[in-house]
Image (cartoon, rainbow, N blue to C red):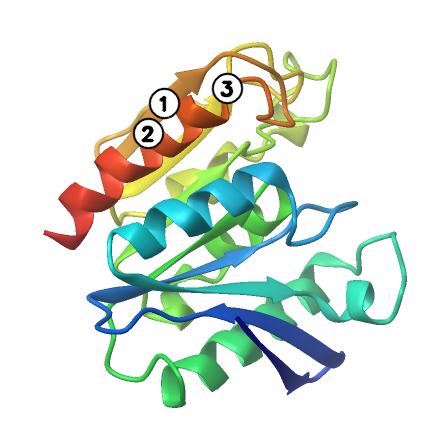
Amino acid sequence: MTIIAVDTPHGPAKVHLHPVTEPRGALVLGHGAGGGVAAPDLVVATDVARSEDLTVALVEQPYRVAGRRSPAPARQLDAAWTAVVDHLSAGDLQGLPLIVGGRSMGARVACRTVEASEAVAVLCLAFPLHPPGKADNPEVSRLAELEAVDLPTLVVQGESDPFGMPPPGPSRTVAQVPGNHGLKTDLDGVGAAVRDWLGRVIA
């Protein structure tokens, strides 16, 4: 694993790069709002992707690198993420088919910026469809962020996630696993869902 510092419009980001010898593609993942790149579901996704011959880049947003726990505004998150993906696409991941995604907030960022990233698919771990307790309020739904993605998309979601259960779509598969938003209850199930989907996307 190599750590790469990347300058962004909102301060330095860090990339935790997990390369493989002969990559068939690359997976770039972002972390959740209050957590980092060591979240159990991100670790499992990394291990599964590498076993499928994908190089994995885990992106640490500038606010985390600076030691802050509260996330930056969406536009800053998106701009920093896009700068990192551009840097990787021109360097360590050059020429590789790119799958983008992340956990919770990181999944939202990847969906909002998918066109700029020129990705071929999107992986969402614990997508926060709505704030807890707000399922009946369409004004705070984030479904539009998912609906704007017309690429093959996998959402791995805990069956009792208080942030809701996204619906499947024409290009969107939703894999329900036991547990809540942390996706820690059945990590084997998370890994199996990611492996099955990656195998089909990369093929």
- Assess disc 2: are there few (<14), some (14-19) or many (≥20) residues with their C-alpha within 10 Å of its C-alpha: many
- In depth, the one of 81 and 113 nearer the eye is 81
* Residue shown at 57% from the left, 43% from the top: 103
Where's residue 153, x and y in %? 32, 41
Give the amino acid type for the residue marked by disc 2 in the picture.
Ala
The residue pinned by badge 2 equals: 193
**Mark 2–mark 1 CB contact (< 8 Å):** yes
Q: Can residue 171 be seen in the rendering of this structure?
A: no
The amino acid at mark 3 is Asp
Of discs 3 and 2, which sits in the foreground? 3
| Residue 174, x across and y down, in percent | 35, 25
Q: Secondary structure at mark 2?
A: helix
Q: Considering depth in this image, is 75 or 8 the residue closer to the camera?
A: 8
Above-or-below relation of 79 to 138: below
Residue at position x 60%, y 38% from top? 40
User: Can you tell which quarter of the image residue 78 is in?
Assistant: bottom right
The residue singled out by tag 3 in the image is: 186
Q: Residue 175: which disc?
A: 1
Q: Residue at x 39, y 71 (%)?
A: 19
Distance of label 2 from label 1 (alpha carbons): 7 Å
Q: Position of residue 166 (x, y in %)?
A: 46, 23
**Which residue does the image show at 86% across and 71% down from the upper left?**
66
* Disc 3 to disc 1: CB gap under 8 Å: no
Count of all numbered marks drawn on residues in the image: 3
Earlier sequence position, callout 2 versus callout 1: 1
Q: Is residue 118 left or right of residue 7?
A: left
Foreground mark, 2 or 1, reads 2
Looking at marks 3 and 1 on the same chain, the residue that comes earlier in the sequence is marked by: 1
In front: label 3 or label 1? 3
In which image quadrant can residue 152 be found?
top left
Task: Name the amino acid type tagged 1.
Answer: Ala
Q: Residues within 10 Å of mark 3 (few under 14, many from 20)?
A: some
